[in-house]
């Protein structure tokens, strides 16, 4: 029996090297566990068994020849808005239910070059719009720590698959918190990297100025290894670049940690507050300086985000017309081409997606463009500047990832604003293009709590080592 | 409160049809969301530049030549095709 519950990339590599198990054996162990466990959790939309076994066999060959890389033979799960050639890629939407990816996303090409094993495609909120995985057109994913609760979202399938030991690591995407909030809800590590460090080519776009792909895993070290593997300039994404990522020479003793007062205000669950403060005390005891700071425009971040993201989405989702992708209503049932678009789009998109397309159409329409969209772009400048000012004084910013604990399935589906408010601490980071990571820092009963680390652009290595120090030295129980 | 007429107009601009039940729900949701985002009105943004893109990249040049894609793969995905072309409903009508 392979101990999947405690498996990390380095432990799996050790296992391969010591001939304790092969990648094929490890892959089969994961596929067996998925078959047994996933009917309850429902993280996977598609299990890519044939692909996984083929990749695992090829990985074993590389390992035997000694031509392996860091991720060779390591089984992973991929969010279903990231294209894997020849496999279904649905973005958890009916309009893409039958879509087979005709090429690999650049991040997948990079994983394949390293010899990683793809176990399957995992659930999400439709087109990554949501914070609970309940907006998937197919089914809701359950939180492995409490099956009556949501795993968070939109990368809820990625987080649940990692937390339930159904992969070593997963890829997710983050637009307003979609990696960090589910990582927090499922008690694992997840990072949204600096905008432009990871290619978006082959990712089904939601809001292009915010979207960024990143890893979810059981350790900070695994997140670092996967980030290293997927990052870099891509000729197919002009916003990507080979930015130098700062070396990490972090000494906790000299570390200046900024605590934004806006992240500890009204609406924060008292147990989350207590656990986050306890984690901060730990850094303090180890010599870090805790410095009170202010990010004064935080109060406008959510409003700014809910104008910019839907605006971009309304343009990005215009391509789904029923002609080039899935057709839900045959053209013989439509009077004319416009009617055909209308019928297919109306049946193909779920409620939340429709709502955001319409919201974005409204904020971009004549008469409202200046009042909403332009204003939001200016607010975004102020939010970005808040962080620039703060990073003059501190090395890193810490606070809770989510103001609330994982909530019950269906608890927040009726009230449009209460779900959006769950993103209140995570939306600022992508607006400013900065890296943010959620790491587990305690529990309330069975329910995990995450602390968020936000760094300056390209400070991923610093974040990883600050997180790693915490994981190795802090008892979260 | 945003009017039913306005919601219908936005739906039309978005190429979406909505039924009466959805209409009510969207009307309520939009009003709540717009009330919330109207918070931005109190923010003074005089002389503030817009941030539309966070790309750190400078000009990127490439050779001016086409990149060929395997079109068969794409055509296979289309619900209707004919002689390697995408088949669509008639666009121009007589009326």
Image: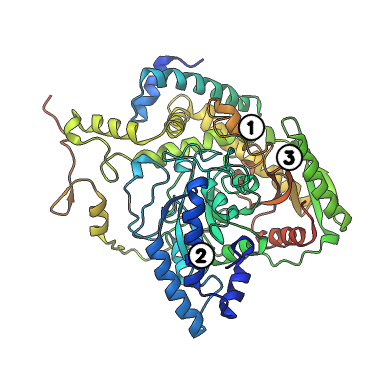
Q: Quadrant of residue A55?
A: bottom left
Element under label 3? loop
Q: Is residue A417 visible?
A: yes
Q: Position of residue A226 (x, y in %)?
A: 57, 64
Q: In this rendering, do the residues under marks 2 and 3 share a single chain?
A: yes
Looking at this view, name the residue that lies furthest to the bottom: A65
Element under label 1? loop
Residue drawn 86% across and 61% down? A253
Identify the chain of the residue marked 1, using the numbered disc in the image: B
**Real-space CA distance between mark 2 and mark 3, rounded to the nearest whole angstrom:** 47 Å
Identify the chain of the residue marked 2, using the numbered disc in the image: A
**Is residue A402 shown left or right of residue B57?**
right
| Residue assigned mark 2 | A29
Q: Nearer the viewer, residue A6 or A298?
A: A6
Crowding near the residue tagged with mark 2, few <14, some 14–19, many ≥20 C-alpha atoms within 10 Å:
some
Q: Position of residue B24 (x, y in %)?
A: 44, 17
| Residue assigned mark 1 | B45
User: In the rendered view of the protein, which quadrant contains the N terminus of chain A?
Assistant: bottom right
Q: In this rendering, do the residues under marks 1 and 3 share a single chain?
A: no
Q: Are marks 1 and 3 in contact (CB under 8 Å)?
A: no
Relative to A343, residue A242 above or below: below
Residue drawn 80% across and 41% down? A274
| Residue assigned mark 3 | A295
Q: Nearer the viewer, residue A113 or A160?
A: A160
**Is residue A306 shown left or right of residue B27?**
right
Residue drawn 75% across and 36% down? A262
Question: Mark 2 against mark 3, which lies toward the viewer?
Answer: 2
């Amino acid at each position: 029996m392979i101990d999947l519950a405690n498996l990390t990339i380095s432990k799996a590599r050790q296992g391969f090297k010591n001939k304790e198990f092969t990648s094929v054996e490890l892959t089969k162990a994961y596929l067996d566990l998925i078959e047994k466990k996933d009917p309850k959790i429902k993280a996977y939309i598609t299990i890519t068994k044939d692909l996984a076994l083929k990749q695992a066999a090829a990985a074993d060959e590389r390992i035997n020849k000694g031509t392996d890389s860091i991720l060779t033979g390591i089984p992973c799960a991929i969010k279903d808005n990231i294209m894997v050639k020849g496999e279904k890629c649905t973005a958890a939407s009916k309009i893409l239910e039958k879509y087979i990816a005709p090429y690999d996303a650049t991040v997948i090409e990079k994983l394949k070059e390293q010899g990683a094993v793809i176990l399957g495609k995992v659930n999400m909120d439709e087109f990554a719009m949501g914070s609970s995985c309940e907006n998937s057109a197919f089914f809701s994913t359950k939180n492995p720590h409490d099956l009556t609760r949501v795993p968070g979202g939109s990368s809820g399938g990625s987080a649940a698959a990692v937390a339930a030991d159904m992969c070593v690591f997963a890829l997710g995407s983050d637009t307003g918190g979609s990696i960090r909030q589910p990582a927090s809800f499922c008690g694992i590590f997840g990072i949204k990297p600096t905008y432009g460090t990871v290619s978006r080519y082959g990712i089904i776009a939601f809001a292009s100025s915010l979207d960024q792909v990143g890893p979810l895993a059981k350790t900070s070290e695994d997140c670092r290894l996967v980030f290293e593997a997927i990052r870099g300039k891509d000729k197919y994404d002009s916003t990507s670049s080979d930015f130098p990522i700062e070396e990490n020479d972090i000494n906790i003793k000299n570390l200046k940690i900024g605590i934004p007062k806006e992240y500890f205000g009204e609406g924060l669950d008292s147990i989350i507050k207590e656990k986050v403060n306890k984690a901060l005390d730990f850094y303090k005891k180890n010599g870090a300086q805790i410095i009170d700071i202010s990010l004064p425009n935080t109060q406008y971040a959510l409003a700014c985000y809910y104008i910019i993201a839907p605006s971009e989405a309304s343009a990005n989702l215009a391509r789904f017309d029923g002609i080039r992708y899935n057709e839900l209503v045959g053209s013989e049932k439509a009077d004319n081409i416009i009617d055909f678009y209308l019928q297919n789009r109306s049946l193909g998109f779920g409620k939340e997606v429709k709502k955001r397309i319409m919201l974005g159409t409204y904020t971009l329409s004549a008469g409202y463009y200046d009042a909403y969209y332009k204003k939001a772009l200016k607010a975004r400048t102020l939010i970005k500047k808040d962080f620039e000012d703060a990073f003059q004084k501190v090395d890193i910013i810490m606070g809770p990832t989510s103001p609330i604990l994982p909530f019950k399935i269906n608890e927040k589906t009726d009230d449009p604003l209460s779900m959006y408010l769950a993103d209140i601490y995570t939306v600022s980071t992508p607006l400013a293009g900065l890296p943010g990571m959620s790491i587990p820092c305690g529990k309330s009963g069975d329910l995990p709590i995450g602390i968020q680390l936000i760094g300056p652009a390209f400070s991923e290595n610093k974040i990883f080592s600050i997180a790693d120090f915490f994981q190795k030295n802090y008892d979260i129980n | 409160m945003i009017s039913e007429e306005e919601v219908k107009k936005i739906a039309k601009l978005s190429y979406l049809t909505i039924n009466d039940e959805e209409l009510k729900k969207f009307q309520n949701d939009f009003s709540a969301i717009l009330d919330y985002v109207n918070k931005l009105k109190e923010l003074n943004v005089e002389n503030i530049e817009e941030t539309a893109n966070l790309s750190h990249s400078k000009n990127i040049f490439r050779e001016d030549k086409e990149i060929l894609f395997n079109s068969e793969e794409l055509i296979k995905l289309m619900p209707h095709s004919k002689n390697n072309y995408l088949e669509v409903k008639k666009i121009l009508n007589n009326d």
